[in-house]
Image: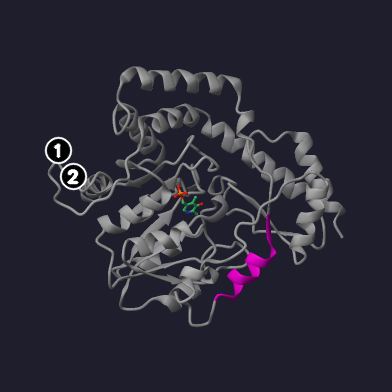
Amino acid sequence: MNDFRKEPKEVRSAEIAAVTAVLDSGWYVLGKQVEEFEADWSRICRVTHTVGVANGLDAIEIGLRSLDIGPGDEVITTPMTAVATVLAIVRAGAQPVLADIDPCTALLDPASVARCITQKTKAILLVHLYGQVRQMDAWVELCHGRGIALLEDCAQAHLAEWKGRRAGTFGAFGAYSFYPTKNLGAIGDAGALVCSDDTLASCARMIRNYGQSTRYHHPVFGMNSRLDELQAAILMVRLSKLESWTARRREIATAYREGISNPSVAMLALPEEENSHVHHLIVLVCNARDRLAAELRAAGIQTLVHYPIPAHRQPPFTDVLRDPLGLRNAEDHAARCLSIPCHPQLADLEIREVIEAVNRFV
Ligand SMILES: *Cc1c(COP(=O)(O)O)cnc(C)c1O
């Protein structure tokens, strides 16, 4: 699914130079590299602030806490996500409320979200699952004038754009993860919150660093979620490749869409616009998913399932609040989805092998 060792040679040498520069600087946490990366990421997302943090989960938690969303508040999100999305809400002290997905996209279904709204709803946390951004006008409209913040989990959506605006810029904040497997990945954990609100950004900056304003002054209740210089330096090197890597992901997605033809295998809905999907994952839907995975494995093709168990079926969340009509689509999707290889280093020959193996499946 990923082979980090296939990173291009010139990228590797630039990374080694960047690591050496950090060692030579003698400064390892929250320094010049972090500031430069934050400025780069803000420019790319077209926001005024990026706050580098330790990981994607923390970016969501810190964003919620900066908005003062916590005990007594409800945050609606999807069960079809990395469990970190739901954990972040709980960690902020708020109640997650899970709404169902649209089976054609695997993204939150607006009708289900509407059924989940109560007096206590403070935010809707969208997850741009698999790298797709959709229907943002409808989400903005749904939140508008109701005192509900629109939040975006962009951990899978680096560079995704909808009507000329980047993922993470439609509501109060966007949360990014730079975990190694993401479209932009560090060599360890890293994350960031993006926003264009000065107060929110300065609050997030304090929370990530023990709630500190100036040295040893702690006006707010904080945590330790600082970003390392080393990770920021690596991220800047890889950032210079992100456009071309994303273009390669689009080529791979197009090749799969044109090549895969099998009555028992479906693909998710087409992106609304070319740039609205960055193909973090390419997901097939098949009733005989486990058998398809086994046959692909026998042909030497690795697959993964994102995600086999929706959040409400995980032991810590069995009592979580949810759509009164249930979460059937999320459960069906979890039982039938299969992610096939898609990463920038994937060769044309490998893509053909995947297509042929999928098409052979009966
Ligand atoms: C990876 C991921 C996260 C969590 O990011 P970490 O950096 O691993 O904490 C959150 N949400 C989604 C959708 C993810 O894919």
| Residue 110 spot, x, y in % from top left | 49, 70
Question: Badge 2, how many Cα within 10 Å: few under 14, some, many 20+?
Answer: some
Residue at point 45%, 57% (across, down): 84
Nearer to us in this view, 51 or 230: 230
Specify how the rendered protein is coloured: one colour
Q: Which mark is residue 27?
A: none
Residue at point 37%, 35% (across, down): 43
Residue 186 as seen in the image, left or right of residue 34: right
Residue 142 as seen in the image, left or right of residue 290: left
Magenta stretch: includes residue 19: no
Q: Which mark is residue 215?
A: 1
Residue 136 seen in render: no
Residue at point 78%, 49% (across, down): 297
Q: Residue beneath label 2, please?
A: 212
User: Is label 1 in contact with label 2 (beta carbons under 8 Å)?
Assistant: yes
The secondary structure type at the circle numbered 2 is loop
* Kind of residue at disc 2: Gln
Magenta stretch: includes residue 335: yes
Q: Quadrant location of the N terminus?
A: top right
Nearer to us in this view, 100 or 225: 225
Q: Residue furthest bottom?
A: 324
Q: Quadrant location of the C terminus?
A: bottom right
The secondary structure type at the circle numbered 1 is loop
Which quadrant of the view contains residue 334?
Answer: bottom right
**Segment colored magenta:** 327-338
* Kind of residue at disc 1: Arg
**Up/down of 268 relative to 224, above or below:** below
